[in-house]
Amino acid sequence: MPRGEPFKIKMVEPIRLISREEREAAIRRAGYNVFALRSHEVYVDLLTDSGTGAMSQEQWAAMMRGDESYAGAASYYRLRDVVEEITGYPYVLPTHQGRGAEQVVLPNLVTRPGMYVLSNMFFDTTRAHVQLAGGRPVDLVTPEAMDTESEYPFKGNMDLDRLEAFIRDHGAEDIACIIMTVTNNSAGGQPVSMANIRATSEIARRHGIPLLFDAARYAENCWFVRQREPGYAGKSPLEIAREMFSYGDGLMMSAKKDGLVNIGGLAAFRDKELYEKACGRLVPYEGFLTYGGLAGRDMEAMAVGLREALDADYLAYRVGQVEYLGQLLRDGGVPIQWPVGGHAVFVDARKFLPHIPPEQFPGHALAIETYLEGGVRGVEVGSLMMGRDPATGRQLPSPFEFFRLAIPRRVYTSRHLEDVADTLIRVYRRRERVRGVRFTYEPKVLRHFTARFEFVE
Ligand SMILES: *Cc1c(COP(=O)(O)O)cnc(C)c1O
């Protein structure tokens, strides 16, 4: 097997590591919040894998075919055909991104205030849209997800016993739907097994509850199934995707991940009824049925990207690159969530910085220090992001204190990732000198994006 990236580079975007003094000035000006840095102040940017990927020559070529007709655009029909081929769902709506799909779908299912929506684990905006619709989101991830060292291959799974028990205790009529997030982003990009999806689907059907996929990283999940689940090694990622989606009633998707585009999203359904309800919200909130907030050229790029994401060489490279960074860090002694997930390496900041308590945000302290050390930008996923209980104003307990290094698709070479690993290993060697932080400004909602900090002495 060749070790190189399965592409060569035709267009380059310069990046540069600014000096230590410049980095110190930049992060000070940013109020010690990496979201307030400007991108030119960052050397390797692992803030997110969302919308940060590089498009292929086929995607750029397809954009030239974009049909910008308001209604009935050919680009829409090309996108719809690809989505149906991959998912088996014939009713397809484009949206401006994943949360656009959430806002056109979820209020149609949460029809009474207080209804529950069950998931292996919600992504932030999905959770927020359940709440905005008056529903109550419930995470039912398998307990193995909480152990960052166990070799369990499918830490993204739904806890089937708790799912059954919840439905028995609360009654199926109070459950709006079940959402299966693949891969499980909030648990570290961890995969869900086909057996778990099948079993969840059986439970959902038995109780008459709709099952939807949150399909942002559907292709990466299919790759893990192929690699780790008995019986799938000989199947193509497309065959695996088709089986996976056959167990559900529809999907919501951010195409900024496995759609391999910089903007775009999707909702798709097996049946007309859910589709028609979503159409009623798509038009006022996103746009007409055949563009949903996107340009024709965006839909063309997505149609090509959705298929490229299922290419076996691409997936081997993609998931392999994340694993490579994970392995380098592990070899350097850095504690990480293991095995690594599909899109990011999650550094266990609680173990890395045991002297920093949760209220001084160890994951965020590590984000600041990693930027200062090597110009590498990652983000905290822990107490800071979790925030306060809106009712009591108290800090919510976070099950993890992570520092996340999310890898954009087809953007950085393995050499860049070696720089990232070296940076973090240097911080690890002087970890007892890393200080915690406290707020100098704490906004009321989504505080991690705009808060400012100072070091605790
Ligand atoms: C990114 C993401 C979303 C939201 O999508 P946006 O395109 O950012 O609006 C929803 N669910 C999951 C699992 C995601 O990763």
Image: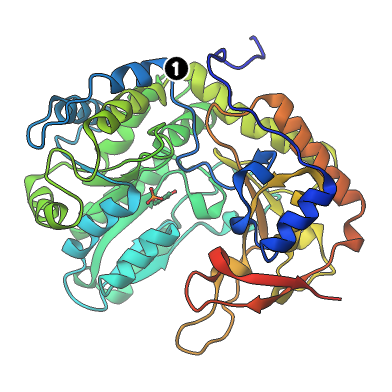
Look at 59% across and 55% down and name the residue there. Answer: 144
Look at 70% across and 35% down and name the residue there. Answer: 325
Q: Which residue is at the far bottom?
A: 392
Q: For residue 294, which quarter of the picture? A: top left
Q: Amino acid at mark 1?
A: Gly
Question: Residue 43 placed where, x, y %?
Answer: 70, 39
For residue 137, above or below residue 96 = below
The residue carrying mark 1 has its beta carbon less than 8 Å from ligand 1:
no
Q: How many numbered discs, if any?
A: 1
Nearer-the-camera pick, 29 or 229 = 29
Look at 31% across and 66% down and name the residue there. Answer: 130
For residue 183, above or below residue 135 = above
For residue 188, above or below residue 83 = below
Q: Which residue is tagged 1? A: 234
Q: For residue 258, which quarter of the picture? A: top left
Q: Is residue 183 left or right of residue 368?
A: left
Question: Residue 27 placed where, x, y %?
Answer: 72, 58
Q: Is residue 85 left or right of residue 141?
A: left
Nearer-the-camera pick, 433 or 154 = 433
Helix, strand or loop at label 1? It is loop
Q: Is residue 337 left or right of residue 268?
A: right
For residue 305, above or below residue 245 = above
Look at 72% across and 34% down and name the residue there. Answer: 16
